Amino acid sequence: MQYSKVANNPLKTRADLQTAVRDLCEPLMPFFSEGGAMIRLAGAGTRHGPVAEGFETFARLLWGLVPLAAGGGDFGHWDLFVRGFTHGPDASHPEYWRQPTWGAQQHVEMAVVGLGLALAPEKIWTPLSPEARERLNNWLLSINSVDLPKNNWCFFRVLVNVGLRKVGARYDAAALEKTLVDIENYYRGDGWYSDGLDGFPCDYYSSFALQFYALIYATVAADTDPVRAKLYRDRARLFARDFIHWQDGEGAMLPYGRSLIYRFAEAAFWSAFAFAGIDDVYPLGVVKGLVLRHLRWWLRKPIFNEHGLLSVGYGYPNLLMAESYNGPGSPYWAFKTFLIVALPETHPFWQAEELPLPELPARRPMKHPGMMVCRNHAADLTVALTCGPVTRFEHSHRAEKYMKFAYAPQFGICVPTEGVTLDALGHDNALALSEEGDYWRVRREFVRNGLVGETLWSQWKPWADVEVTTWVWPEGDWHVRVHHIRTARALQTAEGGFAIARAWLNPLLDDEFESPQQRGLRVRIADKASTVLDLVGNRTASRINPLPNSHLDFSDAHIPTLRGQLAPGEHWLAAAFLPQRGKTTSTSWAGAPVLDLARKKAELLALL
């Protein structure tokens, strides 16, 4: 459901954002534990357990409250947090946060404590007794004696030590320097970091984690480490030129990668960009628009429960898409985007007029995430075509979050509800293969992949004796997919287009098209349409209604789908796909791509 206090907030000024932070935090105050060290919420558990979950919720509110305090904003419940910082690090107290070991969630949340020490010590450090300060100092220092996962977690140690240094407490200068050196292993170039070593993906962890923390460091440690501060700002400038393409004109961003429950953290990079004082890539009014439109887009959505708490989910409460580390308080990492409220009212960011997106090219290839971002200016549609990352980790619905052929903010994605039938698969923008019409397999990982010009390609093996080579490229407002399949077994195929909301209150229209060599289907509802068109005429078109709650933006969906059958041997499939909305939505098939596959094969094979 919507939360009226933020849904009715215009979210245009600094005062509006300060009010939003307070209004979003207020509903959690009754859930503080007696000792103040935890905020205990009902909901599904995580692999980290109740102590870590309670501390996580306590800490994640600080991503909004620390900037609020740093910017001079008031909040009437800091006494609860002071109580928590007194008791949480105390091993003799029932609400002790525990001494975290490798992979413990407590290390994640230590980062914002470090930020608090750096930006708002008068709220977190100064009110503590000398004994409580010593306990907090010791507890935070423990992050220096544990091997952290080799990814964005390294920055947690950085922020902790920088924060302790800022308040004159004990910190580990050697551990700080070594960790900053280690972080260089995750830099891939052009501003992009991967969340781990070679083979890990470039996704939102490049923006709301590694770049975000680097820009905080560049700001709070500029006096002690000016060389890295400049380096991090320069990398952010490069990254910004790519990342701006992930947002559309309404503020929505690509539903891509893991940890989507963090929602409006998707724009946290832009807040850090302004916080770090970078104003020479885009006018501050453009950056302001990127942040504020994104917040408005999210905070009008039904993403809250009946208490006004952020839910686990994406466009609505939905546990299905959560990761194993997502607890009931995890969504409050979204508060990272409130970093800009630390900027004073007189800062040029707040004085600037909010501006729309600048003119962006219709095509933007991005080597590091392995995608081509396409922009239909007339419809304000953003579509990312992907060849996918080579992933070496396992997260919930990895194939759906990384391996679909296309992602679009206004059309979202589906994930499986179970693993047997096609209507439970969530096969939008995917090619699904099955031996007997159940237990379908989609592109999940790659043998190899690449991006050549505007064409993305990948080779993948759903079975040991089945090899699929896929090419994807934009063509006008459409995109084309060609699959070369070598199979030792008979297979059924189902290839989905963009999913759209299921028709309950609006009329649903199916427009069919057939010619000697083409078969297609356009599914229309309200101001949106999704079209699939087989370009060689060897598949039929139909509409599949996936099971409820498989789509991340709305609970019921339609997926226009091309279906066919393959005998053992070698086959070529080719199709075109078109998302439409607003004034561009029509019933016309004019302008659809035409493909001479016989002539195109050699050109495609030469790209490998």
Image (cartoon, rainbow, N blue to C red):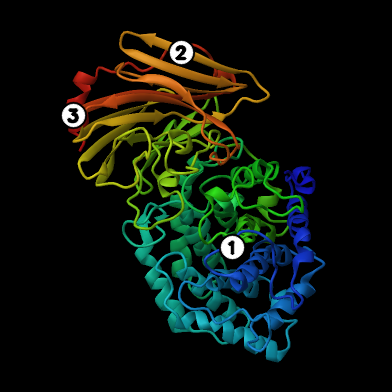
The amino acid type of the residue labelled 1 equals: Gly
Q: Horizontal and vertical percent for residue 269?
A: 54, 54
The amino acid type of the residue labelled 3 equals: Glu
Q: Quick check: can you spot residue 169?
A: no
- The Cα–Cα distance between marks 2 and 1, rounded to whole angstroms, is 46 Å
Q: Nearer the viewer, residue 134 or 59?
A: 59
Could you say which quadrant of the image residue 192 lies in? bottom left
Q: Helix, strand or loop at disc 3?
A: strand
Q: Helix, strand or loop at disc 1?
A: loop
On-image quarter of the C terminus: top left
User: Is residue 576 left or right of 288 when viewed as pictured?
Assistant: left
On-image quarter of the N terminus: top right
When the figure is inspected, residue 281 is found, relative to residue 531, above or below; the finding is below
Q: Horizontal and vertical percent for residue 473?
A: 34, 30
- Among all residues in the image, which is located at the extreme right? 76
Residue appearing at x 68%, y 53% in the figure? 310
- Which residue is the site of mark 2? 512
- Which residue is the site of mark 1? 45
The amino acid type of the residue labelled 2 equals: Glu
Q: Which mark is residue 570?
A: 3
- The Cα–Cα distance between marks 1 and 3, rounded to whole angstroms, is 47 Å
